[in-house]
Amino acid sequence: MKTMITLLFSALCVATVSAQTDEKDNAMLNNGINFLDIPYVAHTLEVTDGEEELIINCDEVDCTTFVEYTLAMTLSPTEDGQVAEGDFATNLQKIRYRDGKINGYPSRLHYIADWVNNGVRNGFLEDVTTAYSPYTQKVSLSYMSSHPELYKQLSKSPENVAKMKEIEKSLNGQEFHYIPKDKLPFNGLPWIKNGDIIAITTNTPGLDVAHMGIAFYVNGKLSLLHASSKEKKVVVSKVALGQMLQNNDNWTGIRVLRMKK
Ligand code: 2YP
């Protein structure tokens, strides 16, 4: 399979890690903070009409690509705190594609349940929720195969829809641990750390996760550093993550994932 790499490298993808928080050692958070005010743009991975390829565009992000670029940067440090460009692309491909192999649109990890399984399987993510929260949800995915019109590569390819159906089927029935929204204090929990990846679970039929971001304690409040579709850029939430969940009837809780070196 041709695995062309389209590098829309912007300086940001390889920006140095500037310690902007009191957590000098928290590279995930520091790298994420470098994205503040970067515009929120949807569908930046759907810009090519041909074969699926690795797109790198750190100048326009959505909630998922923001987390992916931040994670890829943090997995690719050089000794002097720079980001190694080659490693960045390699690690991004490992994060975004099943077992790091690009093989058409369905090989991209569209559902976060699949994206988390892949990170755990390949040793660069751990699901810390499992150890600390007894609450579980069963995966029941059908959103993409039942809304092909919302996805360019599905609306014109019954073959891709069929492949997405198989992927949904392979994931369905799996259980994951989460924190229900009414169990998440606004000042957070001792085991949720700055820089942790937050996946917000949803009751939208056929979907597991509706939004993603990075944990950031601000004045003792667990806030969310995220690419906001409302504010059209990367921001630190003004309200606590717990309040964000209360404000959205379709949001049911959170999964907490942590980068593993
Ligand atoms: C993902 O949506 C897409 C991927 O196809 C895409 O829509 C799905 C099931 N997957 O490669 C990826 C990057 O663009 O985005 C995300 C979307 O959140 C958006 C981007 C956001 O809040 O900014 C992930 O799935 C994370 O939460 C859900 C959400 N999708 C929907 O709510 C349909």
Image (cartoon, rainbow, N blue to C red):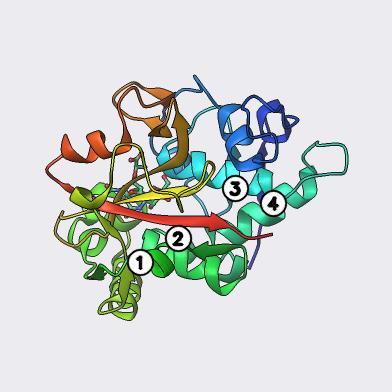
Question: Where is 23 relative to 158, above or below?
Answer: above
The residue type indicated by label 2 comes to Tyr
Res 55 visible: no
What residue is shown at x 61% (from left), y 66% (from top)? 100
> Mark 1–mark 3 contact, CB under 8 Å?
no
Give the alpha-carbon distance from disc 3 to disc 4, as whole Å. Answer: 6 Å
Q: Earlier in the sequence, mark 1 or mark 3?
A: 3
> Observer-nearest residue: 35 or 220?
220
State the residue position of label 4: 75
Q: Position of residue 184 (x, y in %)?
A: 27, 47
Q: Position of residue 130 (x, y in %)?
A: 40, 69
Q: Earlier in the sequence, mark 2 or mark 1?
A: 2
Q: Earlier in the sequence, mark 4 or mark 2?
A: 4
> Mark 2–mark 1 contact, CB under 8 Å?
yes
State the residue position of label 1: 160
Q: Position of residue 212 (x, y in %)?
A: 39, 45
Q: Earlier in the sequence, mark 3 or mark 2?
A: 3
State the residue position of label 2: 105
Left or right: 244 in relation to 256: left
The residue type indicated by label 4 comes to Leu
What residue is shown at x 56% (from left), y 62% (from top)? 125
Viewer-side label of 4, 2:
4
What residue is shown at x 76% (from left), y 51% (from top)? 87
> Mark 3–mark 2 contact, CB under 8 Å?
no
Viewer-side label of 1, 4:
4
Classify 10 Å Cα crowding around label 1: few (below 14), some (14-19), many (20 and above): some
Regarding mark 2 in the picture, which secondary structure is present there?
Answer: helix
Q: Position of residue 110 (x, y in %)?
A: 39, 58
Left or right: 62 in relation to 205: right
